[in-house]
Amino acid sequence: MASFARSVITLLGLFAFFFSSISAHVFVKQWKTTSSLDWQPGQKEWKLENTAYRRASDSIGWVGSKFLTTNKAIVCGASHTPKGQVAPSGGKFFSDADESAGKTLKVRAGGKVSLVLQGDTGRGYPHHHGHLQAYLGKCGSSPTACQSFDASTASYFKIQENKDGVTQLHRQYSSQLGGDVWEVPIPKDIASGSYIFRFEIITWGESVESEGYQDQYYPSCGQLYVESDHQASPSNIPSIKLPEGYHNGNLGPLSVLPGPAMYSESRRRRSMHPPSRSHRRKSFHSPSTSRDGNI
C-alpha cells in the first residue's frame, strides 16, 4: 500500500511538472499610459470594442523559434499554439485587420506605457529567463487608424531592449494588481499619429523535448495614439517588417537580440546622414535544437 501511494505521488508530481512546463503563458492583464492614468482592459477583454489591446491566445501563447521568418503569428500572436509538438502557431492571427481592437489609448511623446503581465491567476510571468523588447509601427495619422489595420504591414522600430529583463520584471510584482508591472518609455521626438505598440518576451531553455527545445516568443499588440509636436519622422529610422525581419533558430548566450538597432534621439539625428551600411543588426543564433541558447 505504501509503495502504491509513493507511486501515485510520483506520478502526480511528474504530471504537475509536465503540465506547468507546457501550459504556463503570459498575457497583458491591464495597461495604461501617462496620458490615461486609469488602468484599461488588456488582452483578456474578449469584447474587442471595449479594449485598445488585441487578443491573447486561447492556449500557451508562444511562437516557437523554428517558425519566426514566415509565420505572421510573430507579429501580434495567434489564437492557438500547439502543445507538446513542433508546429507553427495558427488559428486567428491578431495582426489581421479584423482582429483590431475597438479603441486606441492616448500617450504624449516622451510619456510612458505601463503593463501588468500575468501568468496563472495571482502570478506574474511564469518563466525564469527572458528578454524584453518593445516596438512601434505606424498605422497612420488619424487617431483611429489602428482600429482597422493589418499590423503585419507596418514597419517596426524598436523603442526598448532589455536583455534578460525578466530578472528585473520578477522584482516588480504587484499583489494589488495581480501581476508584474513593466514600463516602456515613448521617445519624445517621434511624430504624432497612431501606432501599433508591439511588446514581446523571449524565453529560452524552458521548452520541452517534444516541442523541439525552442526559444519561446510571446508577442502582443496594443494600439496607441501619440500626441506630439513633431509631424514628420526621418525616413531612415532603423526598422523591420515582420515576420521576415526575424530569423529562425535559438539565440545563443552572446547573441544580439532580434530586430533593428534601438531608436534613439541621437540615432534620429544621425539618420539625417545615414551610414552606407545596413541599419539592421545581425543576430547570430545557436543551432535550433539548443536548449539554452481611449479614444
Image (tube, grey):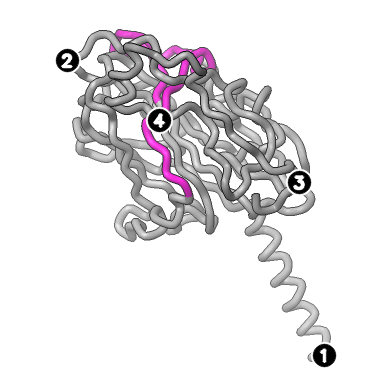
Residue in front for this viewpoint, 129 or 220 = 129
Q: Which residues are magenta?
A: 136-163
Specify the amino acid type for callout 4.
Met
Q: Earlier in the sequence, mark 2 or mark 1?
A: 1
Query: Which residue lies at the image location 35% right of the left edge and 46% below the top edge?
Result: 182
Specify the amino acid type for callout 2.
Asp
State the image coordinates of residue 97 (x, y, percent, origin top left).
50, 14
Which mark is in front, 1 or 4?
A: 4
The answer to whether one can see residue 34 in this image is yes
Which mark is in front, 2 or 1?
A: 2
State the image coordinates of residue 212 (x, y, percent, origin top left).
76, 46
Whole-angstrom CA distance, mark 2 to mark 1, is: 76 Å
Residue at image mark 3? 289
Task: Identify the secondary structure beneath mark 3.
Answer: loop
Residue at image mark 4? 262
Query: Which residue lies at the image location 47% right of the left edge and 14% below the top edge?
Result: 276
Whole-angstrom CA distance, mark 3 to mark 4, is: 28 Å
When asked about the image quadrant of residue 81, the answer is top right
The answer to whether one can see residue 53 in this image is no
